[in-house]
Image: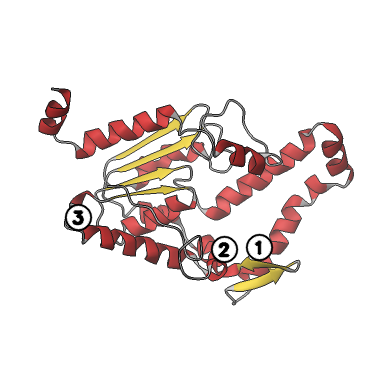
Amino acid sequence: MNNCYDKRGVAASEGDFLSTGLWDLVDDAQTAVQFLKGLPEVDPEKVIVLGHSEGCTIGTAVAVREELGGLVLLSGAVERLSEATKRQRDIAKEDIIHAKGFQGQLLRLLGVQNKVEKQAQKYIDKVMNSAKDVIKVSLIKTNAKWMREHFSYDVREDLAKVICPVLAITGERDIQANHEVLKDLPLFVKGDAEFHVVENMGHSCKYISHTSTMLTVKKDIIAESKLPIHPELEKLLENWLQGHFVSNSQKESVIS
């Protein structure tokens, strides 16, 4: 049985998305797990949480608060939000410096590459020094509670408490999540830990032949939404599930 849900305030879900914090999202995910465990057709010892991007953080937090059969982390494991956004800003500066055409010339003329970090730090300081759930930054409402809670949370501390089998996969062409940190996964997780870096896969877990820039990533992800899941990712998930949750007798019956 596969089960997914919309976050608070998204689509048919109730609540206010803009004022929802990290721990609200963790509570919702844990409630979803508990709901599944209560269904008669579900084996409560084999409930697996799969998280993508921010879901890696949420899933990890749930894994130490709820007994799980397994944890799958796609495009964002072993990394704090503060680390991910800092890396993205560094990439953005390089993208501006090397951008071609009129757009690149204009951005460099305006010195945007020199303002990225300064503007980001100003934004972060305002958010971290606030006490409200929602504040305005440059007249735009922003979820301050969500960012404060993310920046205060060290996902590695919880990874060190995870005892269920863990599978982490990130694409080599993912500029939003750092695949290089996956090698540290076994250093933290107490149980079985497996990680993979998939070539020609971006943040959306689709097959892509070129790496996006921070100037094109939003447009690229929208275009990638129409593509199928990367076939190697599907195979890795299948092999991991077969190895951890399918008995030998079940495998033999499928083969025969």
Type of the residue with mark 3? Pro
Give the labeled residue for mark 2.
147
Quarter of the view holding residue 93: top right
Give the mark nearest the N terminus, 3 or 2: 3
Which numbered disc covers residue 47?
none
Separation of disc 1 and disc 3 at Cα?
41 Å
Is there CB contact under 8 Å for labels 3 and 2? no
Residue 247 makes an appearance in the image: yes
Quarter of the view holding residue 244: top left
Quarter of the picture containing the C terminus is top left
Q: Hey, which residue is sitting farthest left in the picture?
A: 249
Q: Secondary structure at mark 2?
A: helix
Q: Secondary structure at mark 1?
A: helix
> Is residue 174 shown above or below 111?
above
Quarter of the view holding residue 140: bottom right
Type of the residue with mark 2? Met
Give the mark nearest the N terminus, 1 or 2: 1
Q: Residue at x 87, y 37 (%)?
A: 105
Separation of disc 3 and disc 2 at Cα?
33 Å
Give the labeled residue for mark 1.
124
Give the labeled residue for mark 3.
44
Q: Hey, which residue is sitting farthest top in the picture?
A: 256
